[in-house]
Amino acid sequence: MAEALELAAQGRFRVEPNPTVGAIVLDARGEIVGRGWHSGFGDAHAEIEALSEAKRRARGGTLIVTLEPCAHTEKKTPPCVPAVIKAGVARVVAGCADPNPATTGRAAAAFAEAGIEYHVGVLRDRCRAALRRYERHLGADRPWVVSKWATSLDGRIADAAGASRWISNMGSRAFVAMLRGCADAIVVGRETVVRDDPSLRIVPDGATRTSPDRGGGPLRVVFDSLLRTPTTVKVVATARWVPTLFIAVRGADASRREALEASGAQVAEVAAGADGRVSVVEAFRELHRRGARRVMLEAGGALQAACMRAGVVDHVAAFVAPVVIGGAGPTPFEGDGWPIAAARRLEDVRVSPIVGDALIEGYWPLT
Ligand SMILES: NC(=O)c1ccc[n+]([C@@H]2O[C@H](COP(=O)([O-])OP(=O)(O)OC[C@H]3O[C@@H](n4cnc5c(N)ncnc54)[C@H](OP(=O)(O)O)[C@@H]3O)[C@@H](O)[C@H]2O)c1
């Protein structure tokens, strides 16, 4: 179970709001024949990965898994319990029960019926501790939000004229494309759309395209309080093929709404915040209502700051490039901040080299 927990940790920052889960399969003689972990939101679960490595050697063996195998169907992947039964293991050992009321306790009943020995509670406290973020997010009415940006070594997201292409290198941008691939939506502010005219697709930004931009990928979302984005920008021009949503405040100009909708974009209206702009809490609630569970926030410093202040950010993924911009370039957090004693420090931080850039990730503090 300790090794399964180490495997589970490899899914950290990639699977949320799902739990990080690790699994090991022993054959009937007790030899390890399969290892797996949940590695990306929407990807196969740990048990399925470990069983597919073990193949027929799982028959009569033991599945060790950090979390009770899932039995519910309200998610992207099929439930694991039937696959575990089909694999023919004789015994399942789980670290802890699933705190999700949709599935908790269901594995025990199914395994009992299938004649599989089932034991829960090995390293229970450690397995439970690894689920802290998952448990906290269960029942939330907003998606898991990954706040992503790229800065220079001196902390700028653009130069003084607002140009930001390219701060990070091609390797980092390919990594971002991969992160986008397991998100349901990508959110930006109107200013980023107007200044950068991004395509917000799952091919790396700046890559040479060999085919026209058609179809698929996460929902592209623009927070645009008064719907002032011109219809000539890429996200509108391609909205017939790539789902695109504008979120505005209630009562935004009807003719602008019609122009966006005529181009194939969708428009949602939500309540305004105290500053008259889109309320970020209401906007993320609207995205959740539309089925988004994991969202990449790729806005500039104005909207990033509004989201961090409102407490709707769960995880920060900051690319830092070895380039110095200087001057009056904006930062990823514009406006008033916190005094140093109250400054927000990320938790469970991980630093990864990405070619010549550094990716610094951590969870936003819970309190
Ligand atoms: N290096 C990077 O990672 C990176 C990433 C993105 C952008 N950028 C750069 O950042 C610059 C743009 O920065 P930005 O901060 O102006 O762009 P932004 O945060 O993407 O967009 C700001 C706009 O979003 C709209 N918005 C809607 N609701 C909001 C809310 N509750 N709070 C704040 N804004 C809200 C506002 O326009 P309305 O009031 O009209 O709705 C606001 O002007 C560009 O130079 C771009 O190149 C860099």
Image (tube, rainbow, N blue to C red):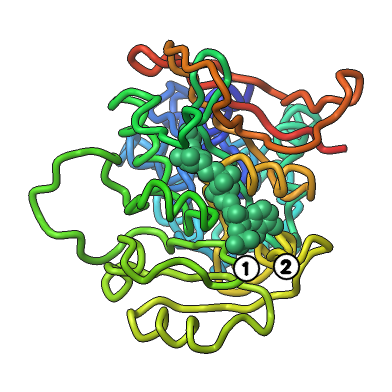
Mark drawn on residue 120: none
Residue farthest left in this picture: 210
The image position of residue 120, as x and y in percent, is 72, 41
Q: Residues within 10 Å of mark 1 (few under 14, many from 20)?
A: many
Of the 4 image quadrants, the one containing the C terminus is top right
Q: Position of residue 242 (x, y in %)?
A: 31, 67
- Give the spatial CA distance, label 2 vs label 1: 12 Å
Q: Residue at x 36, y 71 (%)?
A: 231
Under mark 2, the amino acid is Glu
**Point 73% across, 56% down: residue:** 138
Res. 282 image quadrant: bottom right
Q: Nearer the viewer, residue 46 or 229?
A: 229
Residue 108 x, y percent position in the rendering = 68, 56
Classify 59 as above or below 184: above
Judged from the image, the secondary structure of the residue bearing numbered disc 1 is loop
* Label drawn at residue 225: 1
Q: Is the residue at mark 1 in contact range of ligand 1, meaning its CB lies under 8 Å from it? A: yes
Closer to the camera in the image, 365 or 264: 264
User: Of the residues shown, which amino acid type is indicated by label 1?
Assistant: Ser
User: Which residue carries the number 2 mark?
Assistant: 282
